[in-house]
Amino acid sequence: MANIKQQKKRNRRALKQRMTNLRYRSTIKTSFRRLTDAAEDGGAEVAERSRDLVKLIDRAAARGAIHRNNAARKKRRVAHIVTRSRQPEGVAS
């Protein structure tokens, strides 16, 4: 445990920041699962869910919760899920 007042403050801020980053990462994972389920069901809400997820990923990358390359990779996965959901059954990609 830190003895210096400034270090105690820094530890509090780091813990708060860690929880915020964890909330972003967890929400992104949950949104991916919901998007995948919607794509498999062939629901109409795939476009809306993907749009919301991309916005969340961009916000997390801007805040520094995830790295920008990680954000780009996740956005590519979103695009891949959306395009796969639009293809008719039996078409190989």
Image: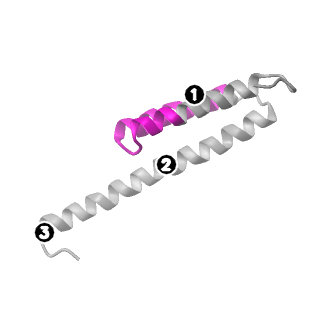
Image quadrant in which the C terminus is located: top right
* Residue under the image location 14 percent in, 76 percent down: 3
Q: Is residue 53 magenta?
A: yes
Compared to residue 28, the image places residue 80 above or below, namely above
The residue closer to the viewer here, 75 or 57, is 75
Q: Which residues are magenta?
A: 47-73
Which SS class for mark 2?
helix
The residue closer to the viewer here, 81 or 25, is 81
Residue ID for mark 1 = 51
Q: Position of residue 77 (x, y in %)?
A: 60, 34
Is tag 1's residue or tag 3's residue first in the polypeptide sequence?
Answer: 3
* Residue under the image location 87 percent in, 26 percent down: 90
Which SS class for mark 1?
helix
Q: Position of residue 31 (x, y in %)?
A: 60, 42
Q: Position of residue 72 (x, y in %)?
A: 48, 32
> In the visual, does 26 lie left or right of 59?
right
Q: CA distance from mark 2 to mark 3?
A: 30 Å
Res 32 quadrant in image = top right
> In the visual, does 40 lie left or right of 58?
right
Amino acid tagged 2: Arg
Residue ID for mark 3 = 5
The residue closer to the viewer here, 36 or 19, is 36
* Residue under the image location 13 percent in, 64 percent down: 6
Compared to residue 63, the image places residue 2 above or below, namely below
Amino acid tagged 3: Lys
Furthest-right residue in view?
90
Residue 25, label in figure: 2
